[in-house]
Image (cartoon, grey):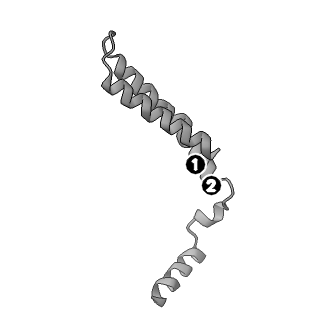
Amino acid sequence: MKYILIILIIILSGTVIFAYNYEFSEENFEQKVIGICILVFSFIWMPLFIYYRYKDKKREDFILTNENLKEMNDFARKE
């Protein structure tokens, strides 16, 4: 999964750079290509990245509860 994400971001970046620098015969074609790359980044790459990063994490670690607040306050007071 890690390598798929890396390859996909390299392809998207390369396509955006190519579309920005190359002069196409059709008017506004580069804007369409860049827009499609942004959509792919937003709706395909980003959800895959989020899934890859947080698939083995516990959801309770990211929820702010009274216990977590107390632990954070105690930790801040120790320093």
The residue to which callout 1 is attached is 50
Secondary structure beneath dot 2 equals helix
Q: Are marks 1 and 2 in contact (CB under 8 Å)?
A: yes
Where residue 67 appears, as percent x and y from the top left, is 60, 77
Quadrant (top left/top right/bottom left/bottom right) for the N terminus: top right
Q: Residues within 10 Å of mark 1 (few under 14, many from 20)?
A: few
Position of residue 49 relative to residue 76, above or below, is above
Quadrant (top left/top right/bottom left/bottom right) for the C terminus: bottom left
Question: Residue at image x 58%, y 70%?
Answer: 65
The residue to which callout 2 is attached is 54
Position of residue 21 relative to residue 79, above or below, is above
The quadrant where residue 7 appears: top right
Where residue 25 appears, as percent x and y from the top left, is 32, 9
Cα separation between marks 1 and 2: 6 Å
The quadrant where residue 66 appears: bottom right
Where residue 8 appears, as percent x and y from the top left, is 54, 36
Where residue 62 appears, as percent x and y from the top left, is 58, 63
In this view of the protein, which residue sits in the foreground, 57 or 37?
37
